[in-house]
Image: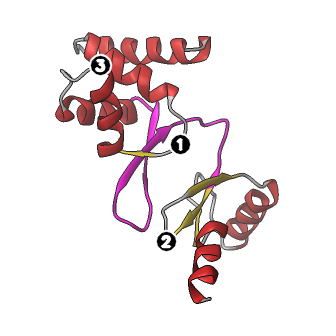
Amino acid sequence: MDKVQNATVKNFLDFMKRKGMNTTVQRRTIAETFFSLPGHHSLEEFYNIIAKEDPSIGQTTVYRTLKLLCEAGFATEIHFSDDITRYEVANPTKHHDHLICLECGKIVEIYDPNIEKWQKEIAAANGFNLTGHIHNLYGQCTDCRKKETYNDI
């Protein structure tokens, strides 16, 4: 775990102390694991990873800790078209949008300053002061398109 991840875990544990909550070894393990994983994970996927590290940690503890991470601003809940809640590390200085394959579920993070600029312009043109957004683009990834072409032969 790098220095930034260690500091983030410490900040999360400090958040829990301020709220009068116990900072257990289990919650520390969950936080450390969460901050070390790239990508977007459902509760079930994340729990399976945690269970391999420490089988004594229950799914309810994982869920409650993920909710605390969101409440503290260290994690973000993401909802794509499949109705599965996923979690990712919140990073307000590194905004990104998502490309999502509707066939295999692949998620690609994208950032394009032109998209950000256009969204602000569109909001302003419609009298909105933009304070945030979620931009998900849905389609079919290259691998799934290749499979479809191969199956048509």
Q: Residue at x 34, y 24 (%)?
A: 30
Q: Is residue 107 left or right of residue 32?
A: right
Q: Position of residue 59 (x, y in %)?
A: 20, 35
Where residue 93 sits, quadrant-wise, is top right
SS class of the residue under badge 1? loop
Q: Which residue is mark 2?
A: 103
Q: Given the current orientation, which residue lies at the most extreme bottom position?
A: 152
Q: Answer yes or no: do the residues labelled 1 and 3 have beta carbons within 8 Å?
A: no
User: Where does the C terminus fall, quadrant-wise?
Assistant: bottom right
Q: Gap between marks 1 and 3, in whole Å?
A: 20 Å
Mark 1, residues whose alpha carbon is within 10 Å: few (<14), some, or many (≥20)?
few
Q: Earlier in the sequence, mark 3 or mark 2?
A: 3
Q: Gap between marks 3 and 2, in whole Å?
A: 34 Å
Mark 2, residues whose alpha carbon is within 10 Å: few (<14), some, or many (≥20)?
few
Highlighted magenta segment, given as a residue range = 72-97
* Front: mark 1 or 3: 1
Tell me which colouring the rendered structure shows: secondary structure
Q: Earlier in the sequence, mark 1 or mark 3?
A: 3
